[in-house]
Amino acid sequence: MRRFVPVALVVTLVFSLSVLPVPSALGAVAPGVTTRLGPSTVDFDVSGDGRFVAFSSTAALTPLAVAGRSDVYVRDTRTGVVTLMSKGIAEPADGPSSLPSISADGRYVAFETNASNLGTTDNDSSPDVVVCDRGNGGACTFVGRAVLSSSQYGDTHAPVLSADASVVLWVWRPVLSFSFGPRRAQGGSDTLAKLALTRLDKDPAGHILPPTRVETVAMAPEGSTATGVSSHSLSADGKQATAIVGLQGEKEAVMALSLDGGPPALVHSTGTHADSAISGDGKKIAFTSDRRAMVFDRASGATITVSRDTSGAVVDGSAPSLSADGRYVSFATAAPNVHDGASVPEAPASIVTRDLVQDEQRERAGLPRLPGALTSPSTRQNCAPANSTCPGNGTSSAPQIASNGSSVVFVSAASDLVSGDDNGTEDAFLRTFTPSLTPDPRSMSLNGSTPAAVAFRHNGIGPLTISSTRVVGNFEVYPTETCSARTLHAGEECAVSVRFRRTTPGTSTGRLEVVLGGGGVVTVQLTGTVSDPDPGDPGDPGVPSRPGALEISPYTVDFGTALVGTMGAVKSVELRNTGDTAVRITKSVLTDSGHPGDYAFTSNCASVPARGSCAITVRHQPLGALARHAVLQIEHSADRARALVLLVGTGVPSTLTVTPAVGRPGSVVTVAGTGFPPGAAVTVTLVGGPEKVGAIAGADGAFRVPMLVFRGGTAGIRTAVAVSVAGSPPVRAERTVLVQVGSVAPPDLVSRR
């Protein structure tokens, strides 16, 4: 999410993942590391991966900076290098700069400046918006006032960049208006302000070209007039925005704004509003309304209050900030019983982070609401009950959560969030979440070549990325695993199935390693044994009975091919108990690895009797083309408590033909397709022109439809495209066709006399 506001600081941000103990009770806060960034300055922004931090500071951190005047810097958190962005050519800037916004890759930085010597032509001291290119020696380009017409003369303020710096959203207001302050100082909307945007073009090297396109943004719904704006925020793709807009004759309202031509949409108009923010994907909008932190889901139209205590009661909350996917929200609250730290009477406001997906899942399942993660915890562990973690001893505010939800930056007057904080001033802090990955079991013994699986569970809050899995020793991953290239969140798990490869009697040891995206490794010790031949039938006298043990067959199930959207094969997985006691099946589920929606249970097993068997049957119904797998996870009461079965099926790929392959404007071609969902609507278009026809796929997934090539249409090689949205993803096929002006008949032959 690209947005205007928060506080900022000079600091090195560290994003890391590590394996830590699981909090055991209320008061044991979600694991994380708090870093004091320094005395609070005005504002900051962070690149997409957290490597680069753009900030303003009145400290002179580099040559050409002037102490006591606000300048904009970028810090590389990996190398520690600080670069001054607001500078003249070999001289200090002659005016202050602030309110930076940085692109996702950290290359481009937009900010507000009163300087007139940043390599641009500026003959006054009024605020301007510039974008500077770190990949071009820091060259700066005006994107606001300098490209407005004289009739639109005014100040420009508070830029916000899209992720790729192709769009800059900023505030325009007439001269003599005041400048934007930091987010935490914002009151109502500025009645003179309007939103505008500049679309930036770049040359092949990525250098910014002089902008020529400035657009004003429609802020009011049809039939209403906007009277001011504040607290604007921009989605990552630069197509959606949100702001608090004053509407004529009404209170301020939270508005969803379309930057590609769509009308503004009212999000919320009841109460007093502040702190609007949009998720990076543009799907959710957060805001404060009457001291409550709220989130609006644009797809469902539902608005929820996220500032609630563990009983579900609404409490005060402010300044909500969303992760890029809208899963995580951080907000400030002084209410008790909201977070996993100690609930201290009359405590100052703390920062709390919640996982909204987990909240929704638990609510649907009828489970109690979990406390949020205390994001501004004290170093003190002496709060009731039972020496729990205390919240900070000073007010914390203005959280900004990282795009991926892994960390939160905030401002706090507390002196006990880190040791040695004795400066007596408000500081900025970074809380980096360090969720753990806990294996179950922590060590595993394998007998013979029968595989068994280890589950790895996420504990804490925040994303935990798994890079890969590997096995050391005479073992192998079989038949599959669901952990590699995966990001887990609260309450989620993945699994790795392993088997012993030795065939002769004996014992070997090895290990299973799960490699985390941050470089850590979670290890499970493995022991494999191949026993001597069976000494006899357990039913024979003198042979002791055996505990229940499952043999599963097969471990890979191939369902073959089927048309997308049609019922395919039904296959069985046999569970055979080789022991003398029954085995309970505690869980059999299709994991979220691959395409679980393509498969469905037709029968299941609750238990397997001694020396008996049971079958789990699964039906295949491909929702998309080509190979689409899923993983069946079976958990049971036998010694190897978990097993994975790989399910493999294929959706018939779609094809498209155009006859004839060469046509002229005004002619009719026949478009035929196969492999489409039976009975589904198919739309056929000819790229580069208005041609469009519809068809319905038959029971065999085929269709055939005539299409007129319009006269006056585009000539040359064009592409016919057929799409059916009945698939997931939509089923699509293409075929090129040559549109040739003039006769397509072969020339007359000339014979030789």
Image (cartoon, rainbow, N blue to C red):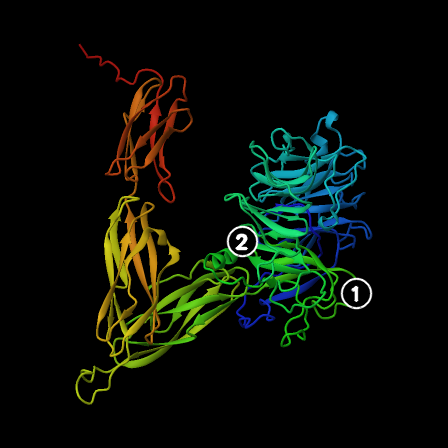
Is residue 689 depicted above or below 575 in this figure? above
Residue 607: where, in percent of width, then height? 29, 70
Residue 529, placed above or below residue 753 = below
Percent across and percent down for residue 696 are: 30, 33
Q: Which residue is mark 1?
A: 423
What is the secondary structure assignment of the residue under circle 1?
Answer: loop
Residue drawn at (33%, 28%), measured in percent from left and top?
Answer: 737
Q: Amino acid at mark 2?
A: Arg
Q: Nearer the viewer, residue 555 or 394?
A: 394
Q: Does residue 105 appear anywhere in the picture?
A: no
Residue at 30% x, 40% y: name it.
677
**Label 1 neighbour load within 10 Å: few <14, some 14-19, many 20+:** few
Q: Residues within 10 Å of mark 2 (few under 14, many from 20)?
A: some
Q: Earlier in the sequence, mark 1 or mark 2?
A: 2
Percent from the top left, x then y, of residue 301? 53, 43
Q: Which mark is residue 327?
A: 2
Q: Residue furthest top?
A: 753
Label 2's element? loop
Looking at the image, do the residues carrying marks 1 and 2 touch, with CB atoms under 8 Å apart? no
Above or below for 230 versus 641: above
Q: Quadrant of the C terminus?
A: top left
Q: What's the amino acid at mark 1?
A: Asn
Is the residue 722 above or below the residue 714 in the image?
A: below
